[in-house]
Amino acid sequence: MSADGAPAARPAGTAGTVIRVLLADDQALIRGALASMLGLERDIEVVAQAGSGDEAVEAALRLRPDVALLDVQMPGKDGLTAAAELREALPSCRVVICTTYGRPGYVYRAMRIGVSGFVVKDAPPEQLADTVRRVHAGLRVVDPALAAESLASGSNPLTPREQEVLRAARKGGTAAEVAAVMHLSGGTVRNCLSSAMSKTGGSTRAEAVRIAEEQGWL
């Protein structure tokens, strides 16, 4: 289905075209299952598989696939970071996020990056193949239920600086230590942490980080 929930018709102009796809997922069983499933499609060829965001970027720059199918949570670069790098370094490659974590915050980040599609792994097999075809044709496709949830939940309430401070705070340490790493004043870090805790509803710094991650805001 497309983002508006309309029936997924195969775009015109794709007859005879073989779409070259790169798959990136840190779980080998899931990665292999997706590759096997897409391999059954006559017009789709999986040309590479990767187990991390770093591997995905390297393989994409080397093989120049038409579509990159990326998980979000992977070792090294996560899928959204890898997607941003690919959009800049290889704009001809359409990027689709395919993840278990259908969180509204991830959708907002993906759309800002310029990702062409966002689907969840429990979608029907034909929907994933159709998404690959549609984004290859230049369309943008988002799972309809996830798109509706994203609109209802609103955008990321954290400022870019608050996101940076929370990411740095994930590793622990005092506010002064976080400030030293980020080359900020201790007061700025404490203010950002306090604001982030208020916006997320977390009673502690660690809880604020957890909630922000669950919402896809980091």
Image (cartoon, grey):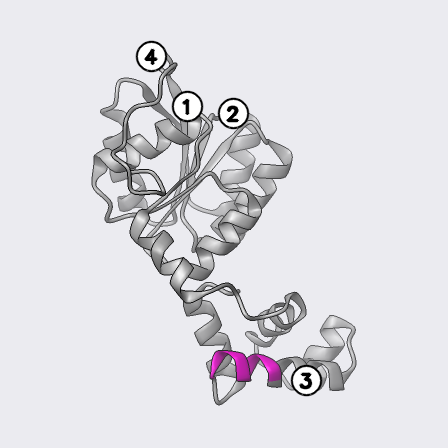
Q: Amino acid at mark 1?
A: Arg
Residue 48 in sight from this viewpoint: no
- Residue under label 3: 191
The image position of residue 66, as x and y in percent, is 47, 25
C-alpha span from label 1 to label 4: 14 Å
Disc 2 or 4, which lies upstream in sequence?
4
Q: Are marks 4 and 3 in contact (CB under 8 Å)?
A: no
C-alpha span from label 2 to label 1: 9 Å
Q: Which residue lies at the image location 33% right of the left edge and 12% below the top edge?
A: 15
Q: Nearer the viewer, residue 147 or 166?
A: 147
Q: Are marks 2 and 4 in contact (CB under 8 Å)?
A: no
Q: Amino acid at mark 4?
A: Ala
Which tag is nearer the camera, tag 1 or tag 4?
4
C-alpha span from label 3 to label 2: 46 Å
Which tag is nearer the camera, tag 3 or tag 2?
3
Label 3: state its secondary structure.
Answer: helix
Disc 4 or 3, which lies upstream in sequence?
4
- Residue under label 2: 63
Q: Is residue 154 above or below residue 118?
A: below
Q: Amino acid at mark 2?
A: Leu
- Does the stretch in magenta take in 180? no
Q: Is 179 on the left-hand or right-hand side of 98?
A: right
**Range shown magenta:** 195-201
Q: Is residue 59 above or below residue 43?
A: below
Disc 1 or 3, which lies upstream in sequence?
1
Q: Which residue lies at the image location 24% right of the left edge and 45% below the top edge?
A: 123
Label 4: state its secondary structure.
Answer: loop
Disc 3 or 2, which lies upstream in sequence?
2
Q: Badge 2, how many Cα within 10 Å: few under 14, some, many 20+?
A: some
- Does the stretch in magenta take in 200? yes
Disc number placed over residue 15 in the picture, else none:
4
